[in-house]
Image (tube, grey):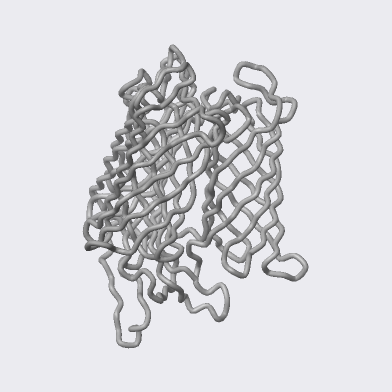
Amino acid sequence: MRIRLAALVALLPTTTWATPDDAPFARIQTVRPAAVEANWTRMKMPDGGRTAFASISYLMALDDDWGFGPGFYGAAKGNYGGIFTVGFTGQRRWRLSRNTHLAASLYVGAGGGLSSEQMRFGGGLMLRPELSLRTEARGWYSGIGISQIRFPSGNVKSGVGLAFSLGRAMDFASFSPADAGQPGRATRRTGLSFDEISLVGGFESPRASSRTRGGTPYAGKVGKAGADLRQYIAEGSWWGFEAAGAAKGGVDGYMEVLGQIGQDWGLFGSPRLRVGGQLGLGLGGGGNVDTGNGWLLRAGPTLRWITPWGPSLRIDAGLTHAPSGAYSATFLRAALSMPLDQRPGWTVDDDGGGTVRVQQVGASVMHLPRVRFKDGRREAVSHLALNLSREFSPWLYGAAQAGSAAAGSAGAYSFGLFGLGVQSRPLWGDMRVGAEWLVGAAGGGGVKVGGGAVTQAELWAQWSVGERLRLRAGVGEFRTMRGSDQSTPLTHLALSYAYGTVQR
């Protein structure tokens, strides 16, 4: 993917710093161009209605011409709130002039939602090719092109139509994974440029006006579990993304993804105990929740305690509202936040130093041979997922997964999981072995998951492919956390990109 920081023209060269004065510290090894890109694609559904898919993708340059990265698509128009997919985009760019480029993209994802006799997503696999022309100015670019959305094993398919894109040029700076555990120093953010990841759980209480898609009132609370990523742009000011799903309350299959902004201030003169507020805008639906076209608004107060040991504890409250649907609910939730990176220089004595820890981001395929459905049958289902992991020490790491069914007959089934893992030091060459345990929420596609709370345990082995690629194979079990609604073995194959960031 031929991108330059200012004008997206050419790939930045790999840069290595090494001087005698720097010997005690590892330094940033590579700086690659990257981009955050949004798309808007209109289409006609098989039941005759019209919708549009909104997306957000993160693309990192692999070489002078190619880029690759994770992405998310969701329905954002018409009465189709709750159709989601998670996947990956590959993109090829050709430079036409100083401020113009041509891009050919292919998105491969998995998901679905709102299945019926008229509208079938099949196994859940989604393909979206696109050809577009983009113009650039001051690190931003916009474009218009043609694209098509199709679910090959179902009947959801658009014609070739117009698509619109908007992107922001960034860069991806990182340490070598071989520097893990060494003292490191950086004068900028590294990796994905997020400062922390939070594990979130709580409850929503739907108001009396809330209805199912069939028009019946809601009763009781809805339990949710998810995660969010934040970047702090000033002390107490942040922006980020949040994804969550239903884990209790009979609405399994509900999912939401929102962008957030917020601000908090020190309380009683303490910089660690902070009170403030946050606003969110995004897409949500599924689980028979009437969110209309899918757009959600969220607002409320937040209380945060930054512990002396690095992690933070947070309590959020407020209101979630679907403007075009019949869903409005108050919420209360708690979050545990773990630091990823931070902008150097927040304090006078911050020299950008810390310990280099390895993060990995990648794609995986999981095969579950005996998935139980609500109608009593058992069938094999394959998942496509996005993986993210972060080492906390040489033997302990945190992990998160988000994905959907891509093969079988569980189209519209999605899941989000997070947890901890342990790993060995390199054994034979660069091979490692380990184990991890994840918990989270899942539902949709007719899969039997009770209230939606699920867990997954796995034993794995990992091999290094060159300096930064990691190939991993594992076996384990996936099951519901309450009762015996679901229990199936799984096999897992993942390919990840490893990079180093500073843990300050």
Residue 403 locus on image (x, y percent): 42, 38
Residue 232 locus on image (x, y percent): 55, 61
In this view, the residue in front, 215 or 103, is 215
- The residue at 71%/50% (across/down) is 301
Q: In which quarter of the image is residue 48?
A: top left
Can you see residue 125? no
Q: In which quarter of the image is residue 407?
A: top left
Position of 385 relative to 118 (above/below): below
Residue 75 locus on image (x, y percent): 48, 30
Is residue 182 rendered to the left or right of residue 266? Answer: left
Position of 254 relative to 179 (above/below): above
- The residue at 48%/64% (across/down) is 341
Can you name the residue that lies furthest to the front here? Answer: 484
In this view, the residue in front, 412 or 136, is 412
Is residue 219 rendered to the left or right of residue 29? Answer: right
What is the number of callouts on the image?
Answer: 0
Residue 293 locus on image (x, y percent): 55, 27
Q: In which quarter of the image is residue 149?
A: top left
Can you name the residue that lies furthest to the right here? Answer: 268
Can you name the residue that lies furthest to the bottom here? Answer: 21
Can you see residue 316? yes
